[in-house]
Image (cartoon, helix red, strand yellow):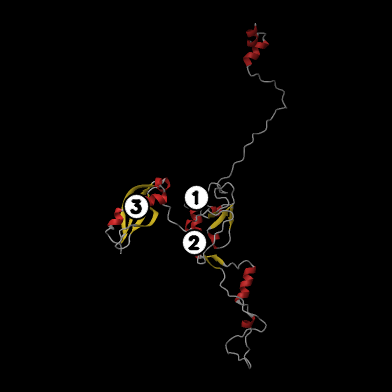
């Protein structure tokens, strides 16, 4: 049990603790004496300020002790400990808790735990039976038929679970694990948050994706609520979108009007008409012999 009263001889040996601390850390790294603490019977720790810039708020701790009935103080250890206002590294967080969407890069591996709630076994079959287990001893004597029960027809082999599993793997259904109901729900909630009906883009859209010609259907149970956008001008191009999502690039948002073309010019070639002068007053004065305004300006 730690003694509440520090040992007198160990507590008074400040110079001894300071000399040992300076020898271990260097004279420039040790500051003023900060105090003592009793670690036990005849065991006292002296604290000195740390002057190193990289360890702000840390302190040197030198522990002194002495044997029973001895007057000589000996050194136990000198360590660097953080103080109350020390700058410390953040608490360690496992990589599985630090990982965020988008952190994966080329060559990175992301193993999944065996009890991952997002996955469940894709096939619960058993291994193929061995030859010894598959050969059963035939009963002696004629087989007795039970009334009211239909016997299996001769020549029909009932497939085993292992055989069914082999066929499922051949047609692409033999995955070891598939999405669980929890995994489906979390994925749907994540996609709904990014491209769902409550987003500002969907609130201002003229129509929903369920009626858009750029929506590509998907397979599985999620096809009832999601699809893939194939409009290069949409903000969700190539993304899984909710059928209730929408944007201004909806295929039926508006019909683009055609560019109007002016009517072709029509010339009247059936009648001989004199050209119409733009300034009749000028034209009449020139015919009467009066000089035009341009001529008067040069005279």
Q: Earlier in the sequence, mark 2 or mark 1?
A: 2
The label number, if any, that marks residue 185 in the structure image: 2
* Mark closer to the chain start, 3 or 2: 3
Mark 2 near mark 1, Cβ–Cβ under 8 Å?
A: no
284 to the left or right of 35:
right
Q: Left or right of 90: which side holds 268?
A: right
Q: Position of residue 94 (x, y in %)?
A: 47, 59
Image height of 77 relative to 166, above or below: above
Assess disc 2: are there few (<14), some (14-19) or many (≥20) residues with their C-alpha within 10 Å of its C-alpha: some
State the CA–CA distance, disc 3 to disc 1: 75 Å
Q: Is residue 286 above or below residue 253?
A: above
Asked if the residue at tag 2 contacts the one at tag 3, i.e. Cβ–Cβ closer than 8 Å, the answer is no
From this viewpoint, is residue 59 visible? no
Label 3 sits on residue: 16
Q: Earlier in the sequence, mark 3 or mark 1?
A: 3
Does dot 2 land on a helix, a strand or a loop?
helix
Q: CA–CA distance between discs 2 and 1?
A: 21 Å
Q: Position of residue 225 (x, y in %)?
A: 52, 58
How many discs mark residues in the rendered view? 3
Q: CA distance from mark 3 to mark 2?
A: 67 Å
Q: Quadrant of residue 91?
A: bottom left
| Mark 3 residue crowding within 10 angstroms, few (<14) / some (14–19) / many (20+) | some
Where residue 112 appears, x then y in whole percent?
Answer: 53, 63
Q: For label 1, count other residues whose C-alpha is less than 10 Å away and answer few (under 14), some (14-19) or many (20+).
A: many
Single out the residue that lies furthest toward the bottom.
Answer: 141
16 or 154, nearer to the observer: 16
Q: Secondary structure at mark 1?
A: helix
- Residue identified by numbered label 1: 202
């Amino acid at each position: 049990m730690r003694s509440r009263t520090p040992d007198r001889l160990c507590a008074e040996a400040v110079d001894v603790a300071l000399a040992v601390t300076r020898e271990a850390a260097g004279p420039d790294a040790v500051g003023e004496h900060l105090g003592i603490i009793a670690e036990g019977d005849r065991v006292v720790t002296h604290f000195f300020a740390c002057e190193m810039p990289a360890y702000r708020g840390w302190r040197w701790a030198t522990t002194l002790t002495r044997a029973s009935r001895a007057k000589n103080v000996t050194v136990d250890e000198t360590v660097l400990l953080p103080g109350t206002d020390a700058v410390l590294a953040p608490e360690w967080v496992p990589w599985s808790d630090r990982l965020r969407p988008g952190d994966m890069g080329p060559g990175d591996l992301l193993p999944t735990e065996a009890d991952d709630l997002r996955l469940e076994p894709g096939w619960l079959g058993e291994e193929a039976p061995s030859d010894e287990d598959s050969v059963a001893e035939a009963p002696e004597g004629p087989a007795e038929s039970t009334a009211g029960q239909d016997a299996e027809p001769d020549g029909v082999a009932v497939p085993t679970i292992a055989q069914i599993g082999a066929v499922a793997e051949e047609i692409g259904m033999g995955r070891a694990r598939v999405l669980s109901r929890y995994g489906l729900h979390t994925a749907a909630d994540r996609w709904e948050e990014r491209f769902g009906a409550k987003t500002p883009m969907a609130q201002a859209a003229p129509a929903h994706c369920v009626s858009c010609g750029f929506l590509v259907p998907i397979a599985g149970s999620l096809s009832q609520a999601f699809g893939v956008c194939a409009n290069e001008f949409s903000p969700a191009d190539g993304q899984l979108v909710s059928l209730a999502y929408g944007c201004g690039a909806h295929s039926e948002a508006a019909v683009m009007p055609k560019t109007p073309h002016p009517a072709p010019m029509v010339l009247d070639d059936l009648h001989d008409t004199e050209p119409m002068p733009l300034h009749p007053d000028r034209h009449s004065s020139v015919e009467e012999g009066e000089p035009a305004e341009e001529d008067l300006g040069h005279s």
